[in-house]
């Protein structure tokens, strides 16, 4: 900063923790020069629950239900990743049919999350009717989750060694019809996303994250893929993704519109993956029971709607885990968000903050306990 | 302009997306994980459900032969329903209604 | 004016540490499928405008202060609805180290909505119960309470 700038008066205003734009409590402190954002600070820890510590206190089979409630939106993928890490510790082979069922449920989760985000993003842009359209179509997915899994939001079907419920022929037909109907609805909405000048005015060129920045700051998920980084954990082929064949969606521009397009095309990709998985699903068992207690160290990765999810577990041969560490995508994306914001106007804040799809419930775990205690 | 007409007609005559919830109750899906009811004639007080319950919402007292079940602590995962050997735990497809006062339900043999 | 309060209750939603499941179900209540705006309910961002406080999630140590603040800012008469199992008792997070366990440890709660995550139908039922409670509560003589 030069001398002339230090004499200028900047305004600092807090944004949150209770704010209509943010459904969740996070506090962002903006330093603004009239309308331009100069600097951003972030303050999190409002919904810290101490989940990782609780996972060390409970039986390892019960932890599935806690890990599922780290985040309600991408609950199945959290449970899947936890099960994957414990299955590695146990040396358990999951039946092939269970792998396909896991893919179907995680893609249903992704559909739900992306439709939710597309709606919220439209709302942040002030496009109320598009918000309603997306949320009406989301109810199709919610119904399918309820019919196949048993609950609208938290499905609770993933257990260690497989899945709890099977998708029979009737339900499979239902899912297929639902997916085709959703595809028709999305085709009707595609011209709005691709051509509407209002959307382009609010998003094109806003919140630019360059390829170099995305790599340097470790962005993950659609945030990185919007900047041209072809990084998707599904291409490593966990569960049945290897057998289904998978290509990540990549956009080059790195602005809010590119991230919007990535998520919109991923909706189509998820529909195709579900249809393909339903067609190729083999017959057989869906669950094997664990026969011993976990021992050793292992890691597992999975792709959430928001990016890469990472689990680390350490066990010592008792029925409890010694340590569990979870790294969620929003935490990895916060540095990119802070790099995106400076230089834009205050009115752009909601659009840019939402464009990384922040999920605060995911973010807040044991890492921040020390930081909070220090204050 | 002309392309809008089919859409307008479809919206005018199609069914509304809204369910009339409090006035017309919706039929619950049979697959939904809902309310839990204990059948005390079948229960042999083995305490399996108490050990398995993730939020510890079930307390079995073998001496008094009662089960204390807290519907406000239950997360409706139905792990107890699937694991009960006597099939004494029944699942209803509808949800627990909201109330003014929390209370623990006690199940006793008649 | 007292009558219009029951015809069109304004809602403030506060997340004090839930998993997002109940929050998106509250949002789903506002959208075409379970349109609560039929009852004149409006989702507000400002506690001084609100009649009904919807709280999700188990209160944790840091959040309790914010929650108490919001409760005190809401003008009388007010009703608090605890949405979801974890807002009622703590539920799955009952043995987490940073969780107090239930919103009723921090502020008085009038209606409990169980379910994990609570269904939109259950949330609507809970708000209808809350309206009955709101009608029972006496309106205090106007002493510049929230300007209404």
Image (cartoon, coloured by chain):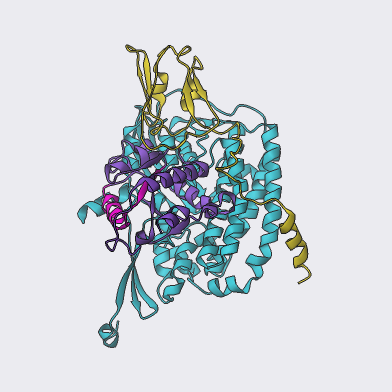
Chain colours: A cyan, B yellow, C purple
Residue C124 appears left or right of B107: right
Instruction: Judge by depth and name the residue closer to the eye, A30 or A130.
Output: A130
Instruction: Judge by depth and name the residue closer to the eye, B48 or A219.
Output: B48
* Residue A99 occupies quadrant: top right
Above or below, comparing residue A24 to residue B63 in the picture = below
Above or below, comparing residue A206 to residue B63 in the picture = below
Q: Position of residue A229 (x, y in %)?
A: 53, 62
From which residue to which does the magenta span run? C61-83
Q: How many marks do you count on the picture? A: 0
* Residue A237 occupies quadrant: top right
Q: Position of residue A208 (x, y in %)?
A: 49, 71
Residue C38 appears left or right of A273: left
Q: Residue furthest left?
A: A374
- Residue A24 within the segment the image draws in magenta: no
Above or below, comparing residue B12 to residue C134 in the picture = below
Q: Position of residue B82 (x, y in %)?
A: 51, 23
- Quadrant including the N terminus of chain A: bottom left
- Residue C67 within the segment the image draws in magenta: yes
Q: Residue furthest bottom?
A: A4
Q: Residue at image x 60%, y 39%?
A: B26
Instruction: Judge by depth and name the residue closer to the eye, A321 or C18.
Output: C18
Q: Residue at image x 67%, y 33%?
A: A282
Q: Position of residue A289 (x, y in %)?
A: 50, 24
Instruction: Judge by depth and name the residue closer to the eye, A190 or C78.
Output: C78
Residue A151 appears left or right of A243: left
* Residue A103 occupies quadrant: top right
- Quadrant including the C terminus of chain A: bottom left
Residue C130 appears left or right of C147: right
Residue A281 showing in the rendered view: no
């Amino acid at each position: 900063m030069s001398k002339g700038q230090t004499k200028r008066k900047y305004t600092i205003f807090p944004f949150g923790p209770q704010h209509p734009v943010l459904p969740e409590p996070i506090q962002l402190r903006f330093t603004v020069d009239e309308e331009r954002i100069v600097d951003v600070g972030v303050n999190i820890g409002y919904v810290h629950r101490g989940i990782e510590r609780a996972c060390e206190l409970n039986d390892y089979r019960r932890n599935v239900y806690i890990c599922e409630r780290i985040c309600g939106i991408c609950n199945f993928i959290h449970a899947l990743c936890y099960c994957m890490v414990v299955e590695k510790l146990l040396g358990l082979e999951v039946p092939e049919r269970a792998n396909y069922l896991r893919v179907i449920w995680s893609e249903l989760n992704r559909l739900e999350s992306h439709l939710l985000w597309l709606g919220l993003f439209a709302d942040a842009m002030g496009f109320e009717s598009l918000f309603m359209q997306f949320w009406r179509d989301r109810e199709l997915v919610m119904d399918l989750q309820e019919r196949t899994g048993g609950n609208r939001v938290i499905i609770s079907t993933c257990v260690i060694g497989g899945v709890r419920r099977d998708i029979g022929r009737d339900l499979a037909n239902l899912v297929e019809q639902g997916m085709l109907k959703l595809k028709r609805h999305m085709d009707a909405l595609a011209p709005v996303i691709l051509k509407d000048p209002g959307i382009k005015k609010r998003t094109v060129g806003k919140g630019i994250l360059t390829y170099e920045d995305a790599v340097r700051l470790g962005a993950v998920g659609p945030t990185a893929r919007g900047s041209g980084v072809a990084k998707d954990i599904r291409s490593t082929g966990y569960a049945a993704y290897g057998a289904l064949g998978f290509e990540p969606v990549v956009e080059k521009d790195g602005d809010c519109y590119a991230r919007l397009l990535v998520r919109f095309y991923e909706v189509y990709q998820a529909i195709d993956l579900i249809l393909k998985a339903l067609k190729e699903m083999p017959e057989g068992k869906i669950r094997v029971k664990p026969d011993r207690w976990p021992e050793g160290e292992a890691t597992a990765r999975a792709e959430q709607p928001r990016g890469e999810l990472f689990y680390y577990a350490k066990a010592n041969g008792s029925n409890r885990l010694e340590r569990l560490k979870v790294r969620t995508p929003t935490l990895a994306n916060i540095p990119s968000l802070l790099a995106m914001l400076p230089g834009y106007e205050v009115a752009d804040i909601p659009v840019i903050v939402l464009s990384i799809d922040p999920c605060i419930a995911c973010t807040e775990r044991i890492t921040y306990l020390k930081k909070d205690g220090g204050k | 302009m002309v392309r809008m007409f089919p859409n307008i007609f479809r919206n005018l005559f199609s069914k509304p997306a809204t369910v009339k919830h409090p006035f017309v109750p919706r039929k619950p899906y049979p697959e939904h994980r809902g309310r839990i009811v204990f059948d005390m004639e079948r229960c042999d007080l083995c305490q399996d459900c108490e050990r398995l319950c993730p939020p510890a919402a079930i307390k079995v007292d073998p001496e008094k032969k009662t089960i204390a079940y807290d519907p406000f602590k239950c997360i409706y995962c139905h792990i107890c329903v699937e694991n009960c050997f006597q099939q004494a735990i029944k699942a209803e497809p509808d949800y627990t209604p909201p109330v003014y006062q929390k209370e623990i339900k006690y199940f006793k043999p008649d | 004016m007292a009558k219009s309060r029951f015809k069109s209750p304004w809602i403030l939603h506060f997340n004090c540490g839930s998993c997002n499941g109940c929050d998106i179900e509250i949002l789903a209540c506002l959208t075409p499928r379970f349109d609560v705006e039929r009852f004149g309910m409006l989702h507000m961002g400002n506690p001084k405008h609100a009649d009904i406080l919807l709280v999700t999630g188990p209160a944790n140590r840091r959040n309790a202060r914010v929650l108490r603040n919001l409760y005190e800012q809401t003008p009388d008469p007010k009703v608090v609805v605890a949405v979801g199992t974890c807002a009622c008792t703590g539920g799955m997070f009952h043995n987490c180290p940073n969780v107090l366990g239930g919103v009723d440890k921090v502020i008085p709660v009038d209606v409990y909505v169980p379910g994990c995550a609570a269904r939109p139908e259950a949330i609507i039922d809970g708000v209808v119960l809350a309206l009955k409670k709101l009608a029972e509560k006496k309106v205090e003589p106007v002493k510049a309470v929230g300007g209404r």
